[in-house]
Amino acid sequence: MMETAEIAARLAAVRAEIAASAAAAGRQAEEIELVAVSKTHPAAAIEAAIAAGQRVFGENRVQEAQQKFPALKAEHDGLRLHLIGPLQTNKVRAAMELFDVIQTVDRPRLAEAIAAERERRGTCPELYVQVNTGEEPQKAGVLPRDADGLIALCRDRLELPVRGLMCIPPVADEPSPHFALLREIARRNGLDGLSMGMSADFAIAVRLGATVVRVGSAIFGERKLTPAPR
Ligand SMILES: *Cc1c(COP(=O)(O)O)cnc(C)c1O
């Protein structure tokens, strides 16, 4: 794990870059929420980020989050946790117990399972619909041409709290066209939340209207484990 002081310094650098990109685009830095992606990193690294003022974290696996976050949430007021990885329907209940935001709603069956669990619990995390802007067969997310239909199902029929859209551009592509496509799908559906931008491209994403950026390695360092398939 990186030293506490280094995590604090990297966090400050990321925040400064978000502020600079926002200013360059005529936006307020406060319009952009920084999700610190802590997957594969130990609770001690998350504690270091909390000590540096960070309160919003992202994890891509329910099970890993269950191992780290109940204790952290009990210890620190105001922590908010985003699920940014694919969600299986049999983990919906566990995910809704722990996560404040689910960014990866990508198919009707999952939306229906979340709606059923919302009936049972009486509460629901904020939701984002994940769009597979690059139409990559191995990647999660609804295809752009099916996005309007899934958004309508979630929002109008199931009355779920859809805040916006999320995308992960193909690794080899220039990200801007993907961010622009996501923004266009959000605009025509009257949604204003845009979760886009990771360590390599969050500055571009902020210029193109991101309201949520998901930054892992730029804060916590390289991950030793390979990321989960998505
Ligand atoms: C891992 C991950 C991130 C963070 O990636 P970095 O390149 O380390 O910033 C962001 N979004 C999703 C969906 C991820 O799985």
Image (spheres, grey):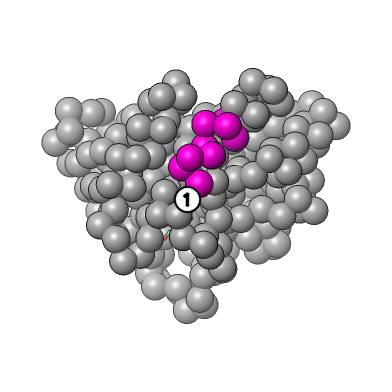
Q: Residue at x 46, y 60 (%)?
A: 136
Q: Position of residue 141 (x, y in %)?
A: 54, 50
Residue under circle 1? 132
Q: Split into 4 quadrants, where in the image is the N terminus?
A: bottom left
Q: Split into 4 quadrants, where in the image is the C terminus?
A: bottom right
Is 107 magenta? The answer is no
The dominant secondary structure in magenta is helix
Residue type marked 1: Asn
Up-down: is 152 above or below 138? above
Q: Position of residue 48 (x, y in %)?
A: 45, 59
- First to last magenta residue range: 143-151
Q: Residue furthest front?
A: 145
Q: Position of residue 17 (x, y in %)?
A: 22, 48
Horizontal side of residue 79 vs 21, given as left or right: right
Q: Residue at x 30, y 40 (%)?
A: 180
| Ligand 1 quadrant assignment | bottom left
Horizontal side of residue 164 vs 101, given as left or right: left
Which of the 4 quarters of the picture holds residue 128?
A: top right
- Is residue 18 among the parts visible in the rendering? yes
Judge by depth and name the residue closer to the eye, 145 or 201: 145
Judge by depth and name the residue closer to the eye, 136 or 67: 136
Q: Position of residue 108 (x, y in %)?
A: 68, 40
